[in-house]
Amino acid sequence: MRVLLLGGAGFIGSHLVSTLSLRGEHAVSVLEPVSAPVDRILHLPVHLYRGMLSDIGLLDSILVQEDIQIVIHLVSTLVPGCDFADFEKEFEQVIAPSLRLMEICCKRHVKLVFFSSGGTVYGERSTLAPFSEEETLAPISHYGWAKQMMEESIRYMNRTHGLRYLILRPSNAYGPGQNLYGRQGLIAVALGKALRNEAVSVWGDGIAVRDYIYIDDLVQATLSLIEQEAAFGQTFNIGSGIGYSVNDILLILKEVSGLKVPVNYLPARQEDVSHVILAIDKIRKMIDFRPISIQEGIKQFFSFVMDGNA
C-alpha cells in the first residue's frame, strides 16, 4: 500500500506510521503543518510534507507524486471540552478543506479512512448498554458534532461521487507515547499527575463510564480493517466492549503503579456524556480482534514510562 496520513505525527498517527513503515511493504507519506512537532516520526522511513489541510493543490500533488492509494485522516483541532469558537476554527481549517479533499480522492480513485470518535458521536445514555454502529448519532459536544459532520459528509460523497471510505470510531486510546502532561487522555494525564504527586482533576463525581483501547490494539485493528476490501463502505467501533468509571481507572492505576493518585473533583461539564461503551460484535465478525485487558494495558504503559521512554 501507498498511504498518506494526515495528522500522522500525533499519538495515534505516529503509531500507525511506525507500524506501517517498519513493515517494509508499505510506502508511507505524512502531511503536517509547519508548526506541528514531528519528533515521534523523524527517525522513520517516511516522506514528510509540511503544509495545511487547506492547501488542496499540495494535497493533490502528493497524491499524484506518491501514487497514494489510501488517505488516513486523523486531523482535528478540537478536544471534547471545546466551545463554539473552537468549533468555528475546526470548520474552517478541517471540515471545509476535508470536503475538497474528498473530491480529489474521488477523482484520483483514492480510498479515505477517517478517524471519528466512539466516545462523543453517540451522545447521552443513562444505561450501560453498549452503542452499536447502527444507532442514531446525537452528540452533545462541539467535538462530537464536528465528527458527525465529517461522517455525514463522507457518506454524502459516497452516495454522490462514489467515494470509497472506511469510518473508524475508536474509544479512548491510551499507551506508550501518549503525552503525560497534555489536555486529554485520562490514563496518561493521571499517570503524569501521580508521578509529580499532583492531584488529578476530575469533572463530576468520577462515576462517568468510558471504554478504553490500548494503542497497539487500535493500530492492529485499523491496519487489519484497511487490508479487508469488504470493510470499505462501512463504519466500525474499535473499543474493548467494557466500561470503566473514572474512579475505576484511577484505582487500577494506583494498584498497578503503587503511586498515590490524589483527586480534585470539579463540577460536572454539560458536554460530557455519562456512559459510553462500544459494541464490538461487528469488528469481530470482520477481523480477529482480541484487545488486552485494561489492567494489562495500564501495566504495560506504566512499565514503558518507568523505563525512561516517556
Image: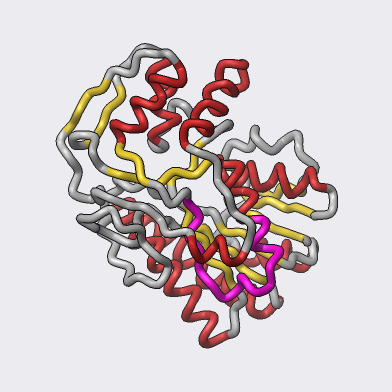
On the question of residue 269 being in view, the answer is yes
Q: Is residue 54 visible?
A: no
Residue 57 occupies which quadrant of the picture?
bottom right
Closest to the observer: 45 or 283?
Answer: 283
Quarter of the image with the C terminus is: top right
Residues in magenta, as a range = 223-239
Q: Nearer the viewer, residue 33 or 262?
A: 262
300 relative to 84, above or below: above
* Residue 117 place in picture, x, y as percent: 43, 56
The answer to whether 70 is drawn above or below residue 176 in the figure is below
Q: Is residue 231 magenta?
A: yes
In the image, is 262 to the left or to the right of 310?
left
In this view, the residue farthest toward the bottom is 160
Q: Position of residue 220 (x, y in %)?
A: 64, 50
Residue at the (67%, 58%) spot, across then down: 224
Quadrant of the rendered image containing residue 66: bottom right
Q: Residue at x 33, y 52 (%)?
A: 276
**Could you tell me residue 245's position as x and y percent?**
30, 38
Q: What residue do we see at 33% from left, 68% from top?
A: 137
Query: Is residue 162 inside the magenta stretch?
Result: no
Q: Quadrant of the N terminus?
A: bottom right
Q: Is residue 183 left or right of residue 219?
A: left
| Residue at x 57% of width, y 76% of height | 233
